[in-house]
Image (tube, grey):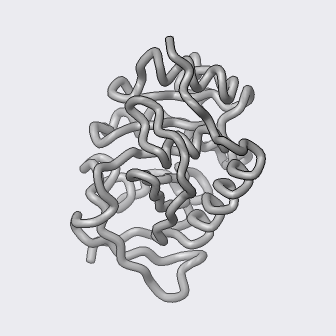
Amino acid sequence: MTLLAGFDQPIEQSQQVFRLILKALSEPGQQVTLPGGPAWSTLNAASTAVLLTLADRETPLHLSAGLNNQQVLTNIRFHTGAPLAAKHGEIGLALFDEHLQAADLQALPHGSEISPELGATLLVQLNTLEGGPALRLTGPGIEKQREISPQLPSALRDYLLERPQRFPLGLDIVLTCGACLMALPRTTHVEEC
């Protein structure tokens, strides 16, 4: 299997991407453009950059069937050393596409009252971050409110509107499209406009 390029300047680029991910998490719904980087097979450039930055030997991954192929797995192993999660409860970072289902969301770890940080980070690779039904965001990192309109899978939209787990439990969600991303941390309250 062919190895694909990672970051040209691994230290500098991973630091830069990390800062941009933190910016997106601290300003929910704000779209952030990542610096030019590789896109591995079924993964877009933003998803690849997030994996190169956040995945390591202690971050069990889950990839949806549509994104999981031998070339992606080989490059994840080579560049990050991250293992695939053996059980759903072990998942630290999950990557899905627009075919995300409610059962997928329910299977991910949402943390516990004692250890809410054990909730998974969910990356969802989308075709666009605009043009969908409008959503209103409020909460930490948003001065009053912010409106977004990504074209979300219906299961994810329902999850965001209903938030079945009580805070601080839940998932931190990162939406990616091309080289762009937007974050919806578990602290963000989402309503229909």
In the current view of this chain or complex, which residue is farthest to the right? 11
Q: Residue at x 59, y 63 (%)?
A: 25
Residue 184 visible? no
The quarter in which the C terminus is drawn is bottom left
Q: Based on the displayed image, in which of its 4 quarters is residue 50 positioned?
A: top right
Q: Quadrant of residue 168?
A: bottom right
Direction bottom: furthest residue: 144
**Picture residue at 58% right of the left edge, 51% below the top:** 169
Residue at 29 percent of width and 50 percent of height? 127
* Between 78 and 65, the one nearer to me in the picture: 78
Asked whether, in this view, residue 57 is left or right of residue 71, the answer is: right
- 139, 168: nearer the viewer: 139
Give the residue furthest to the top: 1
Q: Is residue 133 above or below residue 159?
A: below
Image location (x, y in percent) of residue 102: 32, 39
**Mark count:** 0
Q: Is residue 62 visible?
A: yes
Residue at point 29%, 46% (across, down):
155
Point out residue 3 in the picture as x, y percentages from the top left corner.
56, 20
Residue most toward the front?
Answer: 8
Against 17, residue 41 (above or below) is above
Q: Quadrant of residue 55?
A: top right
- Tell me if residue 21 comes above or below residue 93 in the rendering: below
Residue 27 is situated, as x and y percent measured from the top left of the image, at 56, 72
* Residue in the foreground of this view, choosing between 183 and 9: 9
Q: Is residue 78 left or right of residue 27?
A: right
- The image position of residue 123, as x and y in percent, is 48, 45
